[in-house]
Every structure is written in structure tokens, then in C-alpha cells.
């Protein structure tokens, strides 16, 4: 019996060592590819920053109406943004090379799964970006219009719109990635409905005085005021 | 002056060339109204020193040429001295806009037709005024034509009679800003009614900027085109504009009124940065209408709108305004309505800062005018409170004082325009 135990242990040890020996070159290849790509990415990003600074790209971008969308983008300068994109693109490419090398060495077939999922990740990232942009633009639009409509709860309204769009976006992103779909569906339904209900209750009960004060102000506004003051 | 491109419309055989006066109106009136207008235009031209050949231009479906039908009495007129021609209707009037700018899109085709007809003078009429014989009698039509036809002026702008609480966007932004930027003190710098000489109307027709760029889609601003090229400008006294029911909200109106001027500022920056101070321009005609009696304005609602803006929009304003201005606005917001006074220098700098933000596109342009609205209402509150106390004469004095402040604060605008980063909050 001890012989059989010894044999079983020897075989499992042999299999483990064999597995490690099979995977190790792939892992090393993955790490090397990643390290090399980080090095190349750093060099390329630095070069991009220098070139863009040399041609005064930030000032030119302003002339090209970059600033037209400035409120939609992060606060960083355009040249920094481009350098970061270059860096992460090269790192990502290095990661794929590493995964492919790992795959070739180990014959496990990870890369097919990872690359298949990648398209979903990219689509989800685009969704997230669009959602954040829409949320920011809508919240500013609602805030300004609500203030100009003399609504006392303008900021509350703006925040509500912003978070509704963000929650909606987050649910879409998770659903697209296929992460906990049923929980997301249920959670989103509860959360979205909850926000709408909370806003309704807040305006209907909690902010009743605020709303009635707003309406009273409009009512108190003399009807002939627009006839006395003509803006244009 | 650089050569002006020839008018876009080819010389249509139907249009008689070499006319003296081309009078354009952006709507096609009913036969009776058209006949009455034609009669008044001809009588107005007859009051001038010499005989003029006249073309009355009206919009037509089929482009340039003779109208499909004419009132019988017009058809009998001598074709050598007077004719009615059509120009291609640009677009339908904008019902969602400020009423007196609803036909702004027709100004360019009228000027283009004047170029096609090789006219000496182009007169563009506001239909709300011109079709009303009481508001625009023969004498006022002649008053509009004469300085351009016989006085050697390149641009004749109407100066509308108004009460102390009328045309407040013009009084608070358009008049002081135009005067500080370009020099001539033109009371109503924006509008679709004017008379222009052959030196000016080709520029209106072509939409060319001083650096040669073409902006045919933009609303032309004849006052800026003339002032930035050093042309001779005068103004003539007119009755008050008819006040129609306006469907446009204040933010949108600010965008429609100040937007074209802010755009022109970008194109003409080298010209206005050289101008120092402002000057009076000749004014013809007597102020016929007494200023309408006014009642006191309750400024409380304007102050509350301003305070609401300060509470909610400071984050957005901080992208446009420097910290010192934000601090001043915050201090103003805690004043009671009775003591509410916005200093002229503060308002002038705010307008300049918003003009710069419009150029830099610091925030989206529709957001920009929305963000300006509560501050503008704060200015209205301050002005109305002072005008309530002083009466109509004092109100005119307040506007002149404000305009002088715009003149004196122009150095601030020039600095910010040249080195925007230096002042960035």
C-alpha cells in the first residue's frame, strides 16, 4: 500500500513539475513581453510629448477649436492626453504579444478567449465614455436652464439627471460585459425606480415648501412686468 | 481697401443694371400694401435733390427677375424710373427668434441683388415698420435714403425712439460694446434696416471677413463691416420699433443678439485693437416721438434671479470669469434688493470676459449665453433701480456713463484677448 501511495505522490509531483515546466517559458515570455512593451511605451510616450511640445501642439489644438469640447474631456492638456493614449496602446499591444507567446508555449488557448472578450471590453469602454460625456453635458444644460427658469431646486434637478444617466450607463456597461446579468437587471430596476421614486417623494414631500415657494414667486411676478421692461 | 469679389448672383437679364437706388424688403406684401409701399418709396425718392431710378426688391419663388404679378397701378409706371424685381428668398423668417431679426437671412440676398443691379445705394427695410405708413411715412423713408444717396455716407443706421426700459440688451451690451470696440457711437448697432453705399453692400453680400475668409452662413452686421473698414456712418431718427409678442426666451435672445457681435469680434480683432476711444457720428432727423411714460419697475425678481444664479452657477462662471469678478458677484448677491447696485466697471469686464470665452470656446456657446443671463438680470436690477429714482433723462445718462466705462475698460479686454492664459483663473 505504501508503495502505491508513494507512486501516486510521485506521479502527481511529476505532473505538477511537468505542468510548471510547460507553463514557465510562456509565463516568462508574457512577463518579458510586458516589460519590454512598458519600456517601449514609456519611450514612445516621452517622444510623443517632446514632439508635441516642440510643435506647440496645445496652443494649436486651442486654435483648432479643441476647446469647443473641453468641458467634455478630462482637464489634462491635449498633448498629455495623446501621450497617455500612446503609452497604453503600446502596453496593450505588448500584453497581447505576451498572451500569444504564453498560448504558443503552453497550448492552453487563453488568447482566443481573451481576444474574443476584448471586443466587448472596447465596446463597454466606448459606452462608458459616451455615458459620462452625456451625463456631464446634460447636467450643465439642466442646471443653466433650471436657474433661468427660476427653479430653486436647480442643483438638485441637475444632480438627479446626472446620476440617472450615470446609473443607466453603468447598467448598460455591466450588461454588455456579461457580468452578473440577472443581478444587474434586477439591481438596475430597483435602483432606477428607487431614484425616480426618491426624487418624486423629495419634490412632493421633502421639497414641497421649496417648490411652492418657486411657484409663488412666479405667481407673485407682476403680469405687466414684461410689458414694463423690454429686453429686446 | 482690398478688392471686393463681385456679387454671387450672375447678372440676370431680367434685372436692370445701373439703377440708383435698390430698396429691398424681405417679405412679399399683399398687392395693396406693395402698391402703397412702392408709392411711398417713389415719393421719398422724389424729395431728394435729383431724379433717381429705383428698383423695389421683393422675395420671389423663382429667383431674380420680374414678379409673377403686379398691382395694375404699378405696371403702368414708367419702367425707366421705377420697377419691382424679385430676389431669391433666402429662407423663411425665423419665428423662434427675436422678432426684429426674423428676416436677417434676407439682408444678404438684398445686398447681392444691389450688386447685380450695380446700384449706387442699397436700402434694406424692416417689414414691421416699412409696411406701416404711420411708422414709416415718406419723410422717414427719405431720411433713410438721403445720407447714403446724397450725403456721401456709406452706412445709415436708424436710431429708434425708446423708453428707459426698452431694448435693454442693446443698451447694456450691443451699444457700449460696439462703440468701445470700433469707435462710432451707434445707438442701434444691430438690425435689418439700413441704407448702404456701393462701398459697403458688396461686403454685406459676400460675407467676407477682413482676412478673406467667407462666412456666408453668418448674419451680417453692417455696422461692424463699415466701422472696421473706416467707412462713413451716420444715424437717422426713427419712431419706436413695434413691440410684438416675443416667443423667444432671454438666453436665446442674448445668443441671437450678442452672438453675431462676438463672432465679428474674432474676425476684426486687429482692427478694433487699434481703435482708441469713441466718437459721435452725425445724426439726422428730429426725435419725433416723445419718450413713453413709464412706471417704476419692481427689481425684486431680477435680484432674486441673480442671487439664484450666484448660488448655482459659480462653478460654470469660474471657467469664464476671473476669481476677483466671482468675489464681486458673491458680495453683490448678499445685498438687499433696495441697495443692489452693480458697478459699471464690473459689468463691462463681465461682458468682455464672456466675449473672450466665446472666442476661446471655454464652454459650449449655448451654455455661455445661458450662464450670462442671471448676471444680465442683475445688471437690469441695478439699472432699473437707478432709473426708477432718476427718471427717463437720468436713464439716458446712466447708459452714457456705462458706455464710457466700456471705453475705459477696453484695455482690460485687449490684454485678455492678447494673453488669455495670463488671466486664466
Image (cartoon, coloured by chain):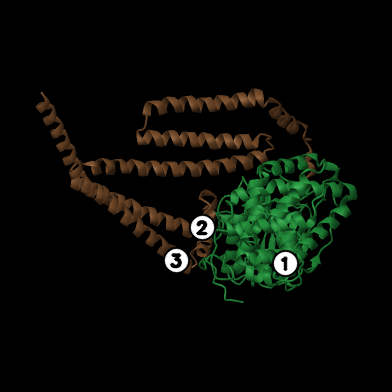
Chain colours: A brown, B green
User: Element under label 2?
Assistant: loop
Give the chain of mark 1.
B
Query: In the picture, which quadrant includes the N terminus of chain B?
Result: bottom right
Q: Position of residue A17 (x, y in %)?
A: 18, 40
Residue at image mark 3: A50
Q: Position of residue B216 (x, y in %)?
A: 54, 61
Give the chain of mark 2.
A
User: Of residues B223 and B372, which is closer to you in this image?
Assistant: B372
Instruction: Reply above or below: A114 against B358.
Output: above
Residue at image location 43% in from the left, 58% down from the top: A83
A92 vs B402, left or right, is left
Residue at image mark 2: A77
Instruction: Reply above or below: B268 against A76.
Output: below
Instruction: Reply above or below: B274 against A77.
Output: below
State which tag comes first along the sequence, 2 or 3: 3
The quadrant in which residue A51 appears is bottom left
Furthest residue toward front: A2
Using the rendered image of the protein, determine whether residue B133 is visible from the camera's viewpoint. yes
User: Element under label 1?
Assistant: helix
User: Of residues B366 and B165, which is closer to you in this image?
Assistant: B366
Residue at image mark 1: B411
Q: Position of residue B154 (x, y in %)?
A: 69, 70
Using the rendered image of the protein, determine whether residue B93 is visible from the camera's viewpoint. no
Crowding at label 3, few (<14), some or many (≥20) Cα neighbours within 10 Å? Answer: some
B158 vs A44, left or right, is right
User: Element under label 3?
Assistant: helix
The quadrant in which residue B425 appears is bottom right
Amino acid at each position: 500500500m505504501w508503495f502505491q501511495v508513494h507512486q501516486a505522490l510521485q506521479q502527481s509531483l511529476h505532473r505538477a513539475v511537468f505542468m510548471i515546466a510547460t507553463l514557465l517559458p510562456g509565463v516568462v515570455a508574457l512577463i518579458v513581453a510586458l516589460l519590454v512593451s512598458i519600456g517601449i511605451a514609456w519611450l514612445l510616450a516621452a517622444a510623443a510629448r517632446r514632439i508635441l511640445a516642440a510643435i506647440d501642439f496645445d496652443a494649436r489644438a486651442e486654435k483648432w477649436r479643441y476647446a469647443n469640447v473641453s468641458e467634455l474631456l478630462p482637464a489634462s492638456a491635449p498633448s498629455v492626453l495623446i501621450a497617455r493614449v500612446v503609452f497604453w496602446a503600446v502596453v496593450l499591444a505588448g500584453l497581447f504579444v505576451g498572451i500569444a507567446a504564453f498560448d504558443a508555449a503552453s497550448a492552453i488557448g487563453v488568447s482566443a478567449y481573451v481576444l474574443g472578450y476584448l471586443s466587448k471590453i472596447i465596446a463597454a469602454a466606448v459606452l462608458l465614455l459616451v455615458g459620462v460625456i452625456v451625463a456631464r453635458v446634460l447636467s450643465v444644460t439642466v442646471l443653466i436652464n433650471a436657474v433661468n427658469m427660476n427653479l430653486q431646486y436647480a442643483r438638485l434637478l441637475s444632480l438627479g439627471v446626472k446620476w440617472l444617466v450615470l446609473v443607466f450607463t453603468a447598467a448598460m456597461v455591466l450588461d454588455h460585459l456579461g457580468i452578473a446579468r440577472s443581478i444587474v437587471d434586477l439591481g438596475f430596476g430597483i435602483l432606477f425606480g428607487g431614484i425616480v421614486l426618491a426624487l418624486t417623494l423629495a419634490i412632493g414631500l421633502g421639497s414641497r415648501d421649496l417648490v411652492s415657494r418657486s411657484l409663488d414667486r412666479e405667481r407673485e411676478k407682476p403680469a405687466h412686468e414684461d410689458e414694463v421692461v423690454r429686453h429686446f | 481697401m482690398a478688392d471686393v469679389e463681385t456679387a454671387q448672383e450672375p447678372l440676370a437679364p431680367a434685372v436692370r443694371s445701373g439703377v440708383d437706388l435698390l430698396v429691398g424688403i424681405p417679405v412679399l406684401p399683399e398687392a395693396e400694401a406693395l402698391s402703397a409701399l412702392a408709392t411711398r418709396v417713389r415719393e421719398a425718392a422724389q424729395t431728394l435733390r435729383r431724379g433717381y431710378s429705383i428698383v423695389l426688391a421683393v422675395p420671389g419663388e423663382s429667383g431674380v427677375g420680374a414678379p409673377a404679378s403686379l398691382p395694375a397701378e404699378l405696371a403702368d409706371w414708367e419702367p425707366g424710373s421705377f420697377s419691382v424685381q424679385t430676389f431669391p428668398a433666402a429662407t423663411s423668417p425665423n419665428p423662434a427668434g427675436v422678432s426684429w431679426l426674423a428676416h436677417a437671412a434676407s439682408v444678404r440676398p438684398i445686398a447681392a441683388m444691389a450688386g447685380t443691379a450695380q446700384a449706387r445705394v442699397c436700402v434694406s427695410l424692416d417689414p414691421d415698420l416699412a409696411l406701416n405708413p404711420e411708422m414709416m411715412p415718406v419723410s422717414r423713408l427719405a431720411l433713410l435714403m438721403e445720407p447714403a444717396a446724397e450725403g456721401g455716407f456709406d452706412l445709415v443706421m436708424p436710431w429708434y425712439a425708446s423708453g428707459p426700459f426698452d431694448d435693454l440688451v442693446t443698451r447694456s451690451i450691443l451699444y457700449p460694446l460696439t462703440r468701445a470696440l470700433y469707435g462710432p457711437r451707434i445707438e442701434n448697432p444691430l438690425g435689418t434696416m439700413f441704407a448702404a453705399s456701393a462701398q459697403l453692400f458688396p461686403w454685406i453680400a459676400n460675407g467676407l471677413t477682413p482676412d478673406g475668409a467667407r462666412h456666408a452662413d453668418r448674419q451680417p452686421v453692417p455696422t461692424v463691416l463699415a466701422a472696421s473698414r473706416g467707412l462713413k456712418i451716420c444715424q437717422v431718427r426713427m419712431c419706436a420699433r413695434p413691440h410684438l409678442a416675443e416667443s423667444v426666451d432671454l438666453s436665446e435672445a442674448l445668443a441671437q443678439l450678442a452672438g453675431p457681435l462676438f463672432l465679428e469680434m474674432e474676425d476684426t480683432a486687429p482692427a478694433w485693437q487699434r481703435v482708441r476711444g469713441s466718437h459721435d457720428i452725425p445724426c439726422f432727423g428730429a426725435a419725433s416721438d416723445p419718450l413713453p411714460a413709464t412706471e417704476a419697475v419692481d427689481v425684486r425678481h431680477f435680484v432674486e434671479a441673480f442671487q439664484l444664479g450666484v448660488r448655482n452657477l459659480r462653478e460654470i462662471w469660474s471657467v469664464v470669469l476671473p476669481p476677483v469678478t466671482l468675489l464681486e458677484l458673491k458680495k453683490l448677491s448678499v445685498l438687499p434688493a433696495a441697495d443692489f447696485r452693480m458697478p459699471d466697471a464690473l459689468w463691462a469686464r463681465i461682458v468682455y470676459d464672456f466675449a473672450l470665452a466665446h472666442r476661446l470656446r471655454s464652454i459650449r456657446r449655448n451654455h455661455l449665453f445661458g450662464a450670462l443671463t442671471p448676471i444680465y438680470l442683475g445688471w437690469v436690477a441695478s439699472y432699473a433701480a437707478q432709473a426708477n429714482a432718476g427718471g427717463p433723462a437720468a436713464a439716458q445718462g446712466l447708459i452714457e456713463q456705462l458706455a464710457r466705462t466700456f471705453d475705459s475698460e477696453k484695455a482690460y479686454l485687449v490684454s485678455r484677448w492678447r494673453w488669455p492664459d495670463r488671466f486664466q483663473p
